Amino acid sequence: MPLFYDQMNRVIELPALPQRIISIVPSQTELLFDLGLDERIVGITKFCIHPADKVQQVTKVGGTKQLNMDVIYSLKPDLIIANKEENEQGQIEELMQHYPVWISDIDDLDSALDMINRIGELTGTTEKAISIVKTIKAGFRELKAAENRLSCAYLIWRKPYMAAGAGTFINDMLQRCGISNLVAAERYPVVADEDLQALNPEVLMLSSEPYPFSEKHLEEFKALLPNAKITLVNGELFSWYGSRLLRSPAYFKGLIENFLPNNEEDTQN
């Protein structure tokens, strides 16, 4: 029986190549489709929105932290793909009693690429996984970072404000853009108005997810941080750690060019 290790260093036993896969992590769901596993994906969450033309046809098993266990049992999966942070521990432990559950644990680009390779091995799509990883690596190599010329705070939630801090995948993406994250606390701390003012970031990024910041929120931050550049950013391209990373370097390049004065960007070319 083939043995595989997940990113929690747990042994996963698969008697055969999995044919009935449930993914309960949106970014990993997209990866499975990009690996060509369409016919073998039997269940996904209601938050799995990519690829839009394919996810509509797949049975929904609830939310990432509120799974419908009865639906999962009815689907009789032979593999469930989860994530340490995005899924609820108690539900995952219950599922482990019945099915092989492969868990990712990702906090930077390297662990994301490792996940892609391992899921390729797990599902018999190694060649395609290697190709995706190779392309992602090439994109990030070509990314011209701002060399820490800019400081930022990156907000993911409102009421209360919550920021992406140290030890997060978002923080690693910011560093790869050459942008210094001023929020030094671990994970996703709550930040008050006075905290943001004390940080005095040059750029305040408002993410499109999990809280959907939009144009209507810009004014409240302009009043709070009159000297900062307030910008809305695509949260998927900062926080989705599957094959959506193929799109991230080009998006980051556009952000960097937008943040830097023209003469600074010219010096990098």
Image (spheres, rainbow, N blue to C red):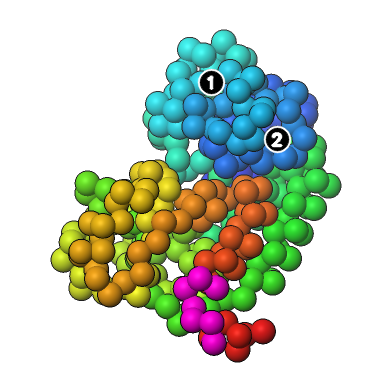
- Of mark 1 and mark 2, the one earlier in the sequence is 2
Tell me if I can see residue 100 in this picture. no
Q: Quadrant of residue 168?
A: bottom left
For the C terminus, the quadrant is: bottom right
Callout 2 secondary element: helix
Instruction: Note whether 17 is above or below 28 in the view shown.
Output: above
Instruction: Give the residue at x 64% y 35%.
Output: 51
Residue hosting label 1: 60
Residue 241 appears in the picture as rendered: yes
Local packing at callout 1 (Cα closer than 10 Å; few below 14, some 14-19, many 20+) is many
Residue 107: image location, x then y, percent:
50, 57
**Residue 157 location, x and y as percent?**
31, 48
- What's drawn in magenta, residue-wise? 257-263
Residue at (54% x, 60% y) in the render: 108
Residue type, label 2: Phe
Q: Observer-nearest residue: 2 or 146?
A: 146
Element class at badge 1:
strand
Q: In the displayed image of the protein, which residue is found farthest to the left?
A: 194
- What quarter of the picture does the N terminus occupy? top right
Residue 69 within the magenta-colored segment of the rendering: no
Q: Give the CA distance from mark 1 to mark 2.
A: 15 Å
Q: Residue at x 75, y 58 (%)?
A: 135
The residue under label 2 is 33
